[in-house]
Amino acid sequence: MTATIISILNMKGGVGKTTITTNISVELFNRNERVLVIDVDPQFNSTQTLMKFFEKNLDNYFNLRDQGKTLARVFQSTNQSRGIGNSQLATIKTPAASIIHTLSPNNKGNDKGGVLDIIPGDMGLIVDINDTASDKFKSFIKKNNLKDNYDYILIDCPPTWGQLTSVALSTSDYYLIPTKLDEFSTIGITLLAELLSDKVNSVNKPLKNLGVVYMFLKKNKAKDGIARDQKKFRTDIENYFTDTMEELVDSKVKPFDTLFYNYEYLITKSALYFDEAIETRHPKHKKKIHDLVDEIQNRLAEGAQKNEL
């Protein structure tokens, strides 16, 4: 089995990209899957969240960064070595394969074969990207047999459309969109769809929408789980999916049934629902991640049978 590569993206920040990426990765690991997280967001929030969870602090991250063991290594070349600092020089001299860092306990997989690795993000990604980035990224994945070594590769994209997002999508099989239900997020989805249309038509492999996750919803008692003042946004956005977006991106665009609600406590904390403190206060969130991953795996299985979503 070769890895399924999924990019998690939205053009708007604060919609739960990091929350979705990190929680899906841990849930898949707990299901004994071999998982690689690639953090292409220069803010490296997924890196921080996962390393704090597994290693309790970021000391090791800064050691890795100073040794050049972050994603920035993939995009740099020896031609950049003139006139740079020691940290960047270390990055250039670091073998590319060594940037893959094992997160699972004691730097080993779980006892049933699960693995959770990460290629850490780096603020240096802001300046290291150029026109050769896509070729370098694809070459890195191929040379290191990443598709053969993992079951899932999750790519956390920046909250903007630029070279990094384009690079991630060029290597992906699917993309997943977390979004809020508000006016700004609805507008953001329409802009994203237009850009995705160009990308889908430019890559030489299928790139399909895996689904849309509604995030940080208002707590309510409605039967469908959507607060009254957010129902209009859901109706508008889902009409856009079927009337316009599906044709633009040449793929079904379907929201997941699993919904995530807004809790103030979780906004100010690392949003990993497997954290003991969060699980104690909000046990339903861990169950929701379980349900979401069930949906994801079911859709992937259906897509494999139909060769599309």
Image (spheres, rainbow, N blue to C red):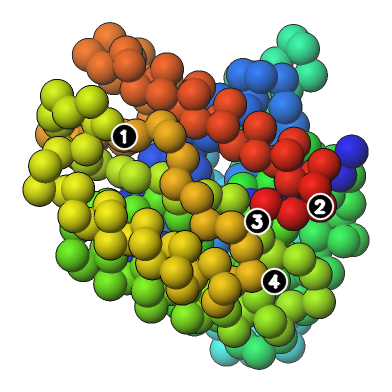
Location of the N terminus by quadrant is top right
Give the vertical position of 128 relative to 47 (above or below).
below
Instruction: Measuring from the top left, give residue 202's x and y in whole percent.
Output: 70, 84
In the rendered structure, the answer to whether residue 227 lies left or right of residue 279 reads: left
Provide the residue designation for mark 4. Answer: 170
Answer with left or right where residue 182 lies relative to residue 189: left
Question: Disc 2 on helix, strand or loop?
Answer: loop
Q: Which residue is mark 3?
A: 174
**Label 2, residues with CA under 10 Å away: few <14, some 14-19, many ≥20:** few
User: Spatial distance from mark 2 to mark 1, Cα to Cα?
Assistant: 29 Å
* Residue position for label 1: 260
**Which comes before the other along the chain, label 1 or label 3?**
3
Would you identify the image quadrant in which residue 204 lies? bottom right
Q: Secondary structure at mark 3?
A: strand
Determine whether 63 is above or below 164 in the image. above
The type of residue carrying mark 2 is Asn
User: Of discs 4 and 1, which sits in the foreground?
Assistant: 1
Percent of width and height locating residue 124: 49, 71
Amino acid carrying label 1: it is Phe
Q: Which residue is mark 2?
A: 307
Mark 4 vs mark 2, foreground winner is: 2
